[in-house]
Image (tube, rainbow, N blue to C red):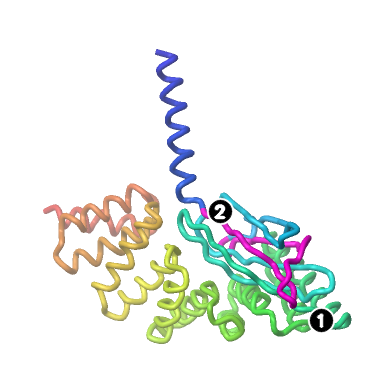
Amino acid sequence: MIRKSLLAAVVLVLGLSSAWAQVQGKIEGRVLGPDGNPLEKVSVSLVSARTSSVHYDLTTDKNGKFRQVGLAPGNYLVSFKMEGFAPASQEIHVGIDETKRFEVQLKTVEAVVLKSLSEGDSLFLKGNKLYADKKFSEAAAAYEEAIARDSGSWQYYLNLGLSYKKLNKPQDSLAAFRKAAELNPESPSANKEIGEALARAGSLAEARPFYEKAVGLSPDDADAHYNLGICLSSTGEPDAALAEFRKTIELKPESADAYYQLGTLLIGQNKIPEAVASLEKFLELAPDHEKAGIARQLIQALKK
């Protein structure tokens, strides 16, 4: 019996490992100089857009290549630094079981400009550390100093906006996010944050195109689909909202809020059994949620 239990446990672990391996992604990149030749020993930093605690530090090989495996699906800020070249960064989206390949070309700059940019990067990293330590006022100050030295780096503005958001400064955060998107229109994070800031201010119609762009740029981002669903639901488009909440659940099965929203919309469409199932799943995932009482009342009324 003990042997069978041990064997079953081993099989379970192997099965979980196999399943996890199937959702992990990879990033493979190549760094070139202005002349198109590969650059060796470039410092490469990968930081998750979702949480700065997930980061990787790499170095390019003699062919200018670098590779990172075992990445959870999502957006990553990839930064490049090498003495004699201007720092660069790029936001990369990694999908489920996807290998994302790309090239970046670094530019040389004058020594005085490089010094200024390096100071900006140092302040940016300082801000990231303060933000991770939940010292949001100090983080904002560091990002502001970084911007004073290099006003053309979109990621400085994005992180400044996130700090202002934590400090409950909605207008300042929105302005910072707009500047980040102006400098990098293809940033999923900047577009999603603009949409959220506008939605919080009650400007749902204005928020919608930013949510839609964020979903288009980052189709595997469950939170982006959920935000778009809330926006569509609030503007009277239940069918479109349902599709977004279903996609959220597909990407993030543990999303209790998506099940709640799905259940309430299904009630409006008179799809009672499916509505009950969604609300029951919501309670299973979040029995102590602030809306748990409402969900129980709805289920009780629907089952009568």
In the rendered structure, are the residues bearing label 2 and label 1 in contact, judged by CB atoms less than 8 Å apart? no
Q: Is residue 72 left or right of residue 4?
A: right
Q: Nearer the viewer, mark 2 or mark 1?
A: 1
- The part of the chain drawn in magenta is 25-50
Mark sitting on residue 258: none
Mark 2: give few (<14), some (14-19) or many (20+) Cα within 10 Å: many
**Residue at the disc numbered 2:** 71
Establish if 1 lies above or below 158: above
Q: Is residue 254 above or below residue 30?
A: above
Q: Which percent across, then down, holds residue 218? A: 46, 69
Tell which of 92 and 159 is nearer to you: 92
Residue most toward the top?
Answer: 1
Which residue is at a point 70% across and 59% down the rendered structure image?
A: 133
Question: Mark 1 belongs to which amino acid?
Answer: Val
Q: Quadrant of residue 270?
A: bottom left
Question: Which residue is at the front of the view, 2 or 97?
Answer: 97
Q: Is residue 119 above or below residue 266?
A: below
Q: Position of residue 181 (x, y in %)?
A: 56, 82
Farthest-out residue, right: 111
Q: Is residue 192 left or right of residue 267?
A: right
Return the residue at label 1.
109
Mark before the other along the chain sequence, 2 or 1 = 2
**SS of the residue at dot 1?**
loop
Residue 48 included in the magenta stretch of the image: yes
The percent coordinates of residue 281 (x first, y second) are 30, 50
Kind of residue at disc 2: Leu
Residue under the image location 43 percent in, 69 percent down: 224
Marks 2 and 1, how far apart at CA: 33 Å
Q: Is residue 2 magenta?
A: no
Residue 263 vertical position relative to residue 254 in the rendered view, above or below: below
**Residue at image location 41% in from the left, 71% down from the top:** 227
